[in-house]
Image: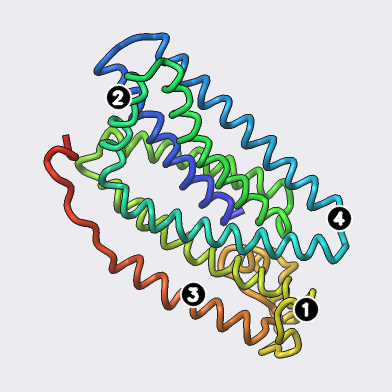
């Protein structure tokens, strides 16, 4: 539930900020109600398509429950989600200062084309967040109960909406960059956990070596099936019987990405970008 909440909070925060910036710019510059409807149409269409795609992938994978193919698909999903999480975290840290300016430019260009271009812009922008969320939730669904995922999603979305409202209202007091740095660091840890899970699956189907090089067994002390074990496994990558390759990949990934993420600096935006 914790990992689901963090992911939904982060994605809801970004999506809510995007929508708020678009509507704020339209209200300030144009104040035309039909434009609002076109934005909502694009957002609604994107979310429906994201749900259909995510549900279709989930049905496909679970149709092969208990087979080698399911394990292969699960492992692939873990690695795909880890790549997206990592890329998204670094991209948003770099773009957070310029997000408002870039969106306003995109809205302006869309309006110069035609009204429906605004629907496409809103749909693509928000739809990307929904697609990322669908893939992340799919990766979580293999080891999390539906109730836990639903509870985490509701908590995360509520947090994201309230945070976006607070940041939008107090932007000069609470930097947007700070929030994305915190969430980005948490998501990098989660990405490392997904990589470890993916390696475990690929070792089971003999795509990777080292399945028998187990470092320890802590099933009696803290089984993954317990509440605490499940939380630690899902969010931090805890494993009751990890292999050497899992631990090497987990530690190596964090040792490389976290320092790069925290030490990375983006140049201050120009006056034009700040306006």
Q: Farthest residue toward the left?
A: 271
Tags 3 and 4 in contact by the CB under 8 Å rule? Answer: no
At x 33%, y 37%, the residue is 166
Q: Which residue is mark 2?
A: 108
At x 70%, y 53%, the residue is 141
For residue 83, the mark is none
Of label 1 and label 4, which has the lower sequence position? 4
Q: Is residue 164 left or right of residue 70?
A: left
Q: Is residue 101 left or right of residue 113?
A: left
At x 30%, y 11%, the residue is 31
For residue 206, the mark is 1
Of label 1 and label 3, which has the lower sequence position? 1
Of label 3 and label 4, which has the lower sequence position? 4
Identify whether 164 is placed above or below 63: above
Q: Is the residue marked by circle 1 packed among few (<14), some (14-19), or many (20+) residues within 10 Å? A: few
Q: Farthest residue toward the front?
A: 113
For marks 1 and 4, give the CA distance. 18 Å
For residue 64, the mark is 4
Secondary structure found at label 4: loop
For marks 2 and 4, give the CA distance. 47 Å
């Amino acid at each position: 539930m914790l990992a689901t909440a963090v992911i939904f909070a982060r994605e809801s925060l970004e999506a809510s900020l995007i929508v708020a910036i678009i509507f704020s710019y339209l209200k300030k510059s144009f104040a035309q109600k039909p434009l609002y409807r076109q934005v909502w149409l694009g957002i609604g269409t994107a979310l429906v398509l994201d749900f259909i795609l995510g549900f279709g992938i989930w049905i496909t994978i679970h149709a092969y429950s208990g087979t080698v193919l399911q394990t292969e698909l699960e492992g692939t999903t873990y690695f795909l989600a880890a790549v997206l999480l990592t890329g998204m975290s670094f991209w948003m840290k770099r773009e957070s200062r310029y997000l408002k300016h870039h969106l306003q430019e995109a809205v302006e260009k869309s309006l110069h084309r035609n009204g429906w271009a605004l629907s496409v812009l809103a749909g693509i922008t928000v739809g990307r967040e929904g697609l990322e969320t669908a893939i992340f939730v799919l990766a979580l669904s293999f080891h999390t109960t539906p109730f836990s995922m639903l509870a985490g999603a509701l908590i995360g979305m509520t947090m994201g909406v309230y945070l976006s409202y607070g940041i939008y209202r107090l932007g000069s007091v609470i930097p947007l960059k700070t929030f994305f740095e915190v969430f980005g660091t948490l998501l990098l840890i989660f990405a490392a956990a997904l990589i470890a899970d993916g390696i475990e699956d690929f070792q089971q189907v003999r795509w990777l070596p080292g399945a028998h090089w187990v470092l320890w067994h802590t099933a009696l002390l803290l089984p993954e099936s317990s509440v605490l074990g499940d939380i630690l496994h899902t969010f931090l990558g805890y494993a009751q019987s990890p292999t050497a390759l899992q631990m090497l990949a987990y530690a190596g990934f964090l040792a490389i990405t976290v320092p790069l993420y925290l030490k990375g600096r983006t140049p201050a935006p120009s006056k034009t970008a700040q306006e």
